């Protein structure tokens, strides 16, 4: 399992029952992904050439005109927004993030789509303009004319986030959104970071009219943690490249000097806003190997394996906690979300405090046991099999049973 390096550093290993979380390392890379990264590091290439080749592979996988490897989905949001703001204008590229004198400095977003990752969009200097509401009726559904009227001469893009059923969220569907934006000639950026599998989602957002869509490379795709995919319109992807790559170039010898010759650019822009989220040839090669694997993998079979693991964890935990009052173990096959999970719920009146104490006890252990905390305010935590190996199930169940037992009995 390769724990030696962490032991030498004095860092406790994690049994990851929380899922493909960035702060835990995302996912495990397959041997062929690691081999591709190692092979890539042994020779030099021009990064712009490698990105063009990667873009062709991403275009094939997504049905988009073009593609690009980013350092994550969040970097894709930053770069995609920067492209929508600046287009081919080198002066605008260099002005970012000061957009005070720039006309198109707004991005329209449903209020229900606001989330902590939209900081990456705002980092370009744009102002978010919200449509739709929360409250009464709950949530206040956005109406087509809300979006239509929010788009104006200042609009650089519309941001649409894949966060769940649009009807439940009260947001316009992506096809509704892209149809309205297209009437105004405004691009739509889709954050689909964690929306894989199914593999069909690779092309779904482009099919539904997205101008750009970003995916995380380090989640279900199984690529390097610091990688991601941006796919979409060729002109926007070119703007991304110009604002992302190292531009320490001489205009007369620059690889892409044809862009000056054909009048697209006045000159090469200097280091852009995306320069701080660079990717190396290792990440590009690793992402491509992982993407190829992801497309070939049998996701239905992998789901069945994870469902069986969730059932096993739930059954063993139920036995281990038998007779403990106020604790309920349930599991869901995750057929609709591709995410089977086990829920451990501590009942009122002290459920919330006990669940929090149990989670902290798991975090204090060695190895650390990381669990899903989405239900913590209702007194529940979850166990996801997504990142577990079969031999981790036993230690996981034992640690969770110990922590819950200790907290419930101590109360
Ligand atoms: C994980 C996630 C991101 C960030 O992805 P990275 O590849 O880690 O940058 C952005 N948006 C959403 C909705 C996510 O779930």
Image (cartoon, rainbow, N blue to C red):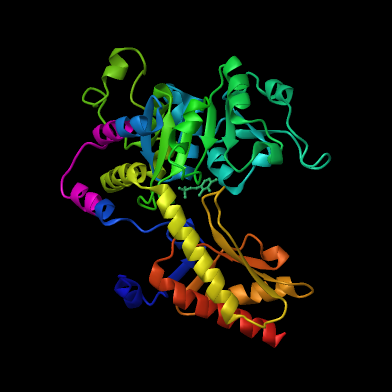
Q: Is residue 184 visible in the rendered structure shown here?
A: no
| Among the 4 quarters of the image, the one containing residue 66 | top left
| Among the 4 quarters of the image, the one containing residue 255 | top left
Q: Is residue 92 visible in the rendered structure shown here?
A: yes
- 319 over 177 or under it: above or below: below
Where does the magenta region start and end? 35-55
Residue 243 percent across, percent down from the top left? 40, 33
Quadrant of the image for the C terminus? bottom right
Residue 314 percent across, percent down from the top left? 56, 69
Residue 342 percent across, percent down from the top left? 57, 64
Residue 36 located left or right of residue 374? left
The residue positioned farthest toward the left in the image shown? 43
- 300 over 324 or under it: above or below: above
In front here: 348 or 219?
348
Residue 248 located left or right of residue 181? left
The tally of labels here is 0
Quadrant of the image for the N terminus? bottom left
In front here: 393 or 225?
393
Identify which residue is drawn at 52% across, 24% down: 209
Q: Is residue 38 magenta?
A: yes
Identify which residue is drawn at 62% across, 83% down: 405
The residue positioned farthest toward the top in the image shown? 262
Residue 236 located left or right of residue 314? left
The residue positioned farthest toward the right in the image shown? 136
| Among the 4 quarters of the image, the one containing residue 154 | top right
Identify which residue is drawn at 62% across, 76% down: 358
Residue 258 percent across, percent down from the top left? 27, 18
- Main SS of residues in magenta: helix
Identify which residue is drawn at 58% across, 79% down: 319
Q: Is residue 380 magenta?
A: no
In front here: 377 or 102?
377
């Amino acid at each position: 399992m390769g724990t030696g390096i962490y032991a030498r550093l004095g860092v406790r290993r994690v049994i990851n029952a929380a899922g493909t979380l960035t702060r835990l390392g995302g996912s495990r890379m397959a041997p062929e992904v690691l081999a591709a990264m190692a092979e890539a590091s042994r020779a030099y290439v021009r990064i712009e050439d490698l990105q063009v080749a990667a873009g062709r592979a991403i275009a094939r996988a997504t049905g988009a005109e073009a593609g690009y490897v980013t350092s994550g989905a969040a970097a894709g949001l930053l770069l995609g927004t920067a492209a929508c703001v600046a287009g081919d204008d080198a002066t605008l590229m260099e002005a970012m993030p000061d957009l005070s004198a720039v006309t198109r400095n707004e991005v329209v977003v449903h209020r229900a789509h606001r989330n902590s990752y939209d900081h990456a969009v705002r980092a370009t200097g744009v102002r978010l303009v919200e449509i739709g509401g929360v409250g009464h009726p709950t949530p206040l559904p956005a109406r087509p004319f809300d979006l239509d009227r929010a788009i104006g001469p200042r609009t650089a893009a519309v941001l649409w986030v894949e966060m769940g059923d649009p009807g439940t969220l009260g947001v316009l569907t992506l096809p509704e959104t892209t149809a309205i934006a297209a009437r105004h000639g405004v691009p739509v950026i889709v954050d689909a970071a964690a929306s894989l599998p199914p593999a069909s989602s690779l092309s779904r957002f482009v099919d539904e009219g997205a101008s750009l869509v970003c995916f995380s490379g380090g989640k279900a795709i199984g690529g390097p943690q610091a990688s991601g995919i941006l796919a979409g319109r060729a002109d926007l992807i070119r703007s991304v490249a110009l604002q992302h790559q190292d531009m320490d170039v001489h205009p007369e010898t620059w690889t892409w000097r044809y862009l000056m010759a054909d009048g697209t650019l006045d000159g090469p822009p200097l280091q852009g806003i995306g320069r701080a989220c660079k990717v190396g040839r290792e990440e590009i090669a690793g992402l491509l190997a992982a993407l190829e694997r992801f497309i070939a993998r049998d996701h239905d079979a992998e789901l069945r394996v994870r469902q069986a693991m969730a059932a096993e964890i739930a059954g063993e935990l139920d036995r281990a906690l038998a007779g403990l009052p106020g604790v309920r173990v349930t599991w869901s096959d995750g057929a609709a979300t591709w995410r089977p999970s086990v829920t451990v719920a501590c009942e009122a009146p002290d459920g919330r405090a006990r669940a929090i104490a149990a989670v902290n006890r798991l975090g204090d252990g060695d190895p650390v046991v990381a669990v899903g905390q989405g239900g913590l305010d209702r007194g529940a935590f979850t166990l996801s099999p997504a990142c577990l190996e079969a031999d981790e199930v036993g230690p996981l169940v034992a640690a969770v049973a110990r922590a819950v037992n200790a907290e419930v009995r101590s109360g």
